[in-house]
Amino acid sequence: MMLFAYALASAAASAVFTLGMLTPHWDDVIAAGFPPVAAWAIVAVGAAIIGGVAFLPALAMVAIAETFALRSVLIYAALGGALALAMSYGIDLTGDMNDPETYFSHEREIIAASGIAGGLVYWLFAGRRAGAWTKSA
C-alpha cells in the first residue's frame, strides 16, 4: 500500500507543480501553440521524475512516521513541504527567491505546495494507518 500511495503522491505533486508553473503564463503558453492536453503528459513525466528523485528521502520520512505511528495529516503535509523545499535548495541555501527578473520567481512556493500536496495524498492512502502493523500481533 505504501508504494501505491507514494506513486499517487508523486502524481499529485507533479500535477500541482505543473499547474503552478504554467498557470501564471497560461495565455503565453496557449498563444505559443501548446495544446492543453500536453500538460497531462508533462504531469506523467514529472511524476516519474519526482518519484525517482524523492524516493530515498521520502522512504526515510515514511520509516520515521511508521516507527513512531505518526498519523496526523498536518505532520504529513509539513514533512512533504519541508522535504520538497530541502530537496529544491540542495546545497545552495542562499538562492535568491525574490528576484523579479526570474521567469519562475515563485518556484519555491510552488515546490513547497507540491510537497504539501504529495504529503496529503500519501497520508490519505497510507499515512492514516501508520504504525498499525505494530499493534496487530
Image (spheres, rainbow, N blue to C red):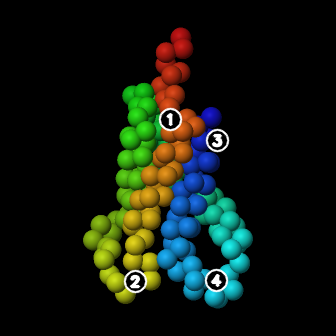
> Mark 3 belongs to which amino acid?
Phe
In the rendered structure, which disc, 4 or 2, sits on the residue that comes first in sequence?
4
Q: Badge 1 local density, few (<14 within 10 Å), some, or many (20+)? A: many
Mark 1 lies on residue: 127
Relative to 31, 89 lies left or right: left
What is the C-alpha distance between the residues marked 3 and 1? 12 Å
Q: Amino acid at mark 2?
A: Thr
Q: Contact, CB < 8 Å: mark 3 with mark 2? A: no
**Disc 3 marks which residue?**
4
Query: Mark 1 or mark 4, which has the lower sequence index?
Result: 4
Q: Nearer the viewer, residue 91 or 109?
A: 109
Residue 21 versus residue 51 in the image, above or below: below
Q: Residues within 10 Å of mark 3 (few under 14, many from 20)?
A: few
Q: For the residue labelled by badge 3, is the local secondary structure a helix, a strand or a loop?
A: helix
Q: Residue 3 occupies which quadrant of the picture? A: top right
Percent x, y of residue 4? 64, 41
Mark nearer the N terminus (3 vs 1): 3
Q: Residue at x 39, y 65 (%)?
A: 109
> Which of disc 2 and disc 1 is earlier in sequence?
2
- Which residue sits at x=56%, y=67%? 18
Tag 4 and tag 3, C-beta contact below 8 Å? no
The residue indicated by pointer 4 is 30
Residue type marked 1: Gly
Q: Earlier in the sequence, mark 4 or mark 3?
A: 3
Name the element at disc 4: helix
Residue 102 numbered tag: 2
Q: Secondary structure at mark 2?
A: loop
- Residue 98 locus on image (x, y percent): 31, 77
In space, the residues marked 4 and 2 are separated at their CA atoms by 21 Å
Percent x, y for residue 135? 49, 15
